[in-house]
Amino acid sequence: MVQKRTHVFLPEGLLSDIDQLIGKGKRSAFLTEIVEREVRKQKLLRALDDAAGCWKTEDHPELEKGSAAFVKALRAGSDTRLPKDS
């Protein structure tokens, strides 16, 4: 992965806490991990917001009584069972 240097301003107390917890030599790795996690979270939240309203109840009449009832009916209708592990 190509890395690029950047300047980030952090409150002195926060930087001190980071150094005490993980050590000065590990700042970049720690901050990278935290930022990557937050970026994934923000992307997921944005995707969920973008998808809001795309599920139409009228397109899925099989779920009229709820997904649990639908799954229960599927399981009850199955004639085959998987063998149990010994």
Image: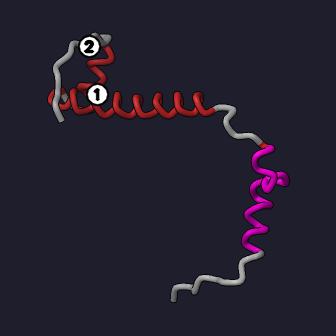
Quarter of image, res 6:
top left
Q: Residue at x 39, y 34 (%)?
A: 37
On residue 52, which mark appears?
Answer: none
x, y percent for residue 78: 72, 78
Count up the numbered dots: 2
For numbered disc 2, what is the local secondary structure? Answer: loop
For numbered disc 1, what is the local secondary structure? Answer: helix
Q: Quadrant of the N terminus?
A: top left
On residue 31, which mark appears?
Answer: 1
Q: In the rendered view, would you say 32 is above or below 78? A: above
Q: What segment is highlighted magenta in the picture?
A: 58-76
Residue in front for this viewpoint, 19 or 50: 50
Give the side of residue 23 with respect to residue 17, left or right.
left
Amino acid type of the residue that numbered disc 1 sits on in the rendered structure: Leu
On residue 8, which mark appears?
Answer: 2
Q: Earlier in the sequence, mark 1 or mark 2?
A: 2
Residue in front for this viewpoint, 20 or 54: 54
x, y percent for residue 29: 23, 33
